[in-house]
Amino acid sequence: MAGVDLRGVRKSYGETAVIHGVDCAVGDGEFVVILGPSGCGKSTLLRMVAGLETITGGEIAIAGKVVNQVEPKDRNIAMVFQNYALYPHMSVRDNMAYGLKIRGMARAEIDRRVRDAAGILELGHLLDRLPRQLSGGQRQRVAMGRAIVREPDVFLFDEPLSNLDAKLRVQMRLEIRKLHQRLRTTSIYVTHDQVEAMTLGDRLIVMNAGIAEQIGPPLEIYGRPETVFVAGFIGAPAMNFLAGRVGQGGKSVHIEGGLELAADHQAGAAGRTVTVGFRPEDLVRGGPGNAVRLRVDLIEPLGADTLVHGSIEGGQGQVTARLPGTQRLAAGEVAALTLAADKLHLFDKDSGKRI
Amino acid sequence: MIKRVAFDHAWLPYVLVAPQLAITIAFFFWPAGQALFQSVLIEDAFGLSSKFVWFENFERVFGDPNYLNAAGVTAVFASCVTVASLSIGLLFAVMADRVVRARHAYQTFLIWPYAVAPAVAGVLWGFLFNPTVGIISWILKQSGYNWNYLLDGDQAMFLIVLASVWNRVPYNFLFFLAGLQSIPKSLIEAAAIDGAGPGRRFWTIVFPLLSPTAFFLMVVTIIYTFFETFSVVHAVTGGGPGKATEILVFKVYSDSFRALDLGGSAAQSVVLMAIVVSLTVVQFRYIERRVHY
């Protein structure tokens, strides 16, 4: 087992730069999730770790050894592909044994490893089937089995669950988590699904347009997003944003429309343009904090929660609040809510960075 | 999924397929029926009288050393053309699939020979290798090789194989290329990560996945060598020298239109027909069993 170090990793196709320098040290046994919208370069980054894409600049090291010029087969990694990439003409057993046979492993050892992996993944009764005779979830497990038998330094997952239906995805997500707790193999997992990212990762790398916007544990990223992009990308329903200016004394913000919100920390010189963010669940009934009056446009009762969409008096734009499911509200009503000062996220308008 | 199309008039679908049916009946079923019918008759050379003889024509055909010779020649010819055109087509396809720059130019040029009719291909190669005026035979003679396919049976065979292969490679190339491009890239990448080098990847992943294509092409090419190459033989060697390049389909032609042994040649074409029918059956059986992975 080993860690993976990314040092200033860059990628460009001709003139077009797609990854602008990513730095991250993935520790031994850590599960790191690369999260981002499509086209942000997250799969490219993973494929560079795998050796399927050349590295334009910077260094990638696996187990302390720089692998920029090392062939994929010599990096001691295993990858699970989005479309599983099972060899269609081989049985499940042969699919899993392929990489071991090529490495010239003894038959008995191959058999043992395949049987072990099949046991872990409950594939024992399917070993002689062909991939086309399997369901989506079973294929997914075979793809993981093929990775496990190799006992590699690093597992790489390229959106492995995106071809499964919602229910199976939840189930496989748990299985991947359990598998990692059992094997403790360093893993890098690429996804655009924030729930997968939050539940699987020890740490997340949130990527946008080829830049790692924030790297950190899921709850830290949720609770303290470093940029407007991260704040808006993580969390569903998304964080609310209002435009405003820092008020006199630097500890309050004037929202466009007239509302004034008190912040819990110094936000810079008066008049500085900022973006104010707050999560839907931070708008609550009662308690200390800024009084906010929400004119209700639309209610979405979800059972446990009720999502309330509307506009804030003295503010511009749509705002969503997540209230307990017991709340009874109707469109057209005005709800008196509070927003605690320490729940405000302030970002510089120009740089998008957290203040 | 099968689509069911609804027509407003019951007669419309029949009208729509009528032209194709008419062509098939006029040019396939009718001649085939005639051949079956004539194969059990013996006709005099002037076509004035004929006699029903059961299977005497077939007995004569299979007892004829010339026919057995033609069968042997066909076997050699068909296997040479099939093996060569399949392997060259596959080689070109693998190469063309790797090329990044100007790949469309390569692909276009590689497909061109297919646009040349087999007869024209035959004339072309016959001319290049013509013992008196051919440029390649001039080069061969300059380098001390005694080239004269009009006298040497092996050279004649080489020449018709060459012309047929040249004519056939593009077709095989095209199918192999399509086959290669339909293999998901991630399979190759998965194999690369699993530790397989390029050669190993080709033989353990790519080639098995191409095998249905290869099998289809093999059958189609065999059928090509049995029939369409008639014009190559006709244009280049006329079956000679001696009977060194007389393939079965050419013998059918020369026995009927030159020797006027209509019954005998009809029997031969029935045998050919049987071979093709059985090849086609095998083909469909196999393809039906394993089209998709």
Image: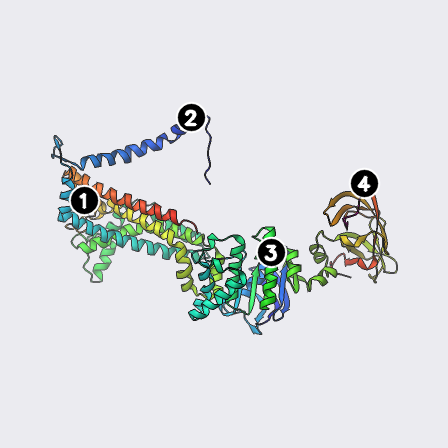
| Residue at point 15%, 53% (across, down) | B151
Tags 2 and 3 on a common chain: no
The circle drawn on residue A332 is 4
Residue kind at label 3, given as amino acid type: Gln
How many residues crowd around disc 2 within 10 Å: few (fewer than 14), some, or many (20 or more)? few
> Which residue occupies 36% across, 55% down?
B90
| Residue tagged 3 | A171
- The residue stretch that appears in magenta: A320-329
The chain containing the residue under callout 3 comes to A
The amino acid type, in three-letter code, at marker 4 is Gly
Rounded to the nearest angstrom, the CA distance separating label 4 from label 2 is 62 Å
Horizontal and vertical percent position of residue B275: 25, 45
Q: Circle 2 is placed at which residue position?
A: B10
Element at label 2: loop
Instruction: Judge by depth and name the residue closer to the eye, A333 or B185.
Output: A333
- Check contact, mark 2 vs mark 3: CB within 8 A: no
Q: Chain of mark 2?
A: B
Q: Which residue in the structure is indicated by mark 1? A: B251
Q: Secondary structure at mark 1?
A: helix
Q: Amino acid at mark 2?
A: Ala
Which-is-in-front pick, marks 3 and 1? 3
Of circles 4 and 1, which is in front?
4
User: A201 or B190, which is in the foreground?
Assistant: A201
Contact between labelled residues 1 and 2, with CB atoms less than 8 Å apart? no
Q: Tag 1: Cα neighbours inside 10 Å, few (<14), some, or many (≥20)? A: many
Residue A185 in view: no
- The residue drawn where x is 54% and y is 54% is A137
